[in-house]
Amino acid sequence: MGAGIRVKNLCKSYDKLEVIRNWSLTVKSSERIALLGPSGAGKTTFLKIAAGLEKQTSGEIVTDCKRIGFVFQEPRLIPWRSVAQNLKFIREDADIENILARLGLAGFASYYPNQLSGGMKQRVNLARALINEPDLLILDEAFSSLDLKVKLGIVDDVVKQWQEKGFTILAVTHDLKEALLLADRIVIISAAPSIIIHDLKIDLGQARDFSDPEFIKIESQLLKLMAGQ
Amino acid sequence: MILIVQAVPVISWLSLVIFAWGIGWKGPVFIAFVSLIPMALLTTVSGVRNLDKNLLEMARVYKIPKKKVLKDIYLGSLIPFIIAIVDVTLGQAWKVILVAEYLSGNTGLGVQILSARYEVNVAKVWALTLFAVVLGFMAERVIKKVFERISKKWVPA
């Protein structure tokens, strides 16, 4: 089961710089939400507040989340620890071989981060999040630095894991395709001080293909919405 | 405080040590310690400041116990700095100890060199110097090897 999140009148400022203004949002258990918006609009700040890394200035955020999996934008792997040790850092009793095999990293347990490609490091970053058995998976522009093929592969892995485990997904991305492949709901926010300007349900079924006419239609509708912000 | 300790000349320490403990083994040990500890501390502090904050944030998200964070992140980040400290202080410690023995010790190589000087025995001074160089070189190699073995756990292949 996934975690639920209720956000009410959430505001965040850094000194005089107002970043988030009055966000209200309810995320149901096992829902997949993608946040889209310009840089500096407070998307990552919101994820950090949801993960308990930062405090909001006012408003409230209530969640029944017990375990978080956070896939950071940069892999944040411990350089002097092997892949297996990086995963064991999160959970000593983790079934490392199993998770690595599921993410296409079988045989790489003893490798060090500097011996892996960017895509592989991000997979380890994802493996580390999944090994924590999260009820909330946070993706902070997790695949933005990867090429399209690698990105599609990892998004597919995330969707498969979601189907199996049913965790809630909270993703921030700049890539509309990635958001549409990943989410049931897309929340579009304005520039800072950001407000939620659109909260849209995405009806594309489970198996998604970005060459599907319906996918392209929704994508262009969203592009128009975002351009008209 | 550290900067003040660092600024005190070795000669002043020597005089103070002789007043406090007289001639003996305590003086050279103390002087080696106060001469080298400021540099070791300052280097360690700059190591802690250079720590990757992203790794610490990752550990916070996953609620990793403090002990584990200290062992796996802090110690690993500090290893290059500790290696640099050992590298620099080993060579210096040896020389500082010899000077301290020479001026305030009652035993040791420094004292032997002093007595050779009194005897105007140039050959003995050369021989002791050569012995000091060889001993210093060997000690440095042995300690470095031991250290490399210990720190291997924190250095990627």
Image (cartoon, coloured by chain):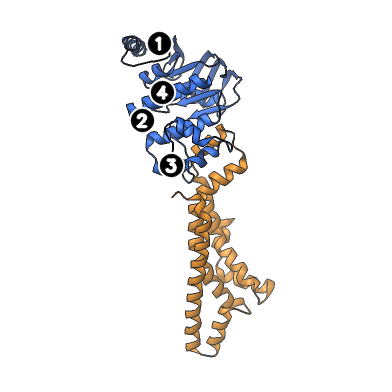
Chain colours: A blue, B orange
Which is nearer the N-term, disc 1 or disc 2? 2
The reply to whether label 1 and label 2 mark residues of one chain is yes
Q: Nearer the viewer, mark 1 or mark 2?
A: 1
Q: CA distance from mark 1 to mark 4?
A: 15 Å
Q: Residue at x 43, y 25 (%)?
A: A157
Tags 3 and 1 touching, CB below 8 Å? no
- The quarter holding residue A117 reads top left
Tell which circle, 3 or 1, labels the residue nearer the N-terminal end. Answer: 3
The label number, if any, that marks residue A113 in the structure image? 3
| Residue type, numbered disc 1 | Leu
Answer above or below: position of B124 versus A52. below
Distance between the alpha carbons at the discs numbered 2 and 4 = 14 Å
Which element is circle 1 on? loop
Of callouts 4 and 3, which one flags the residue occurring earlier in the amino acid sequence? 3
Q: Position of residue B135 (x, y in %)?
A: 51, 74
Which residue does the numbered mark 4 point to in the structure image? A156
Residue behind mark 2: A146
As measured in the structure, the alpha-carbon distance from the residue carrying label 3 to the one carrying label 1 is 36 Å
Are callouts 3 and 2 both on one chain? yes
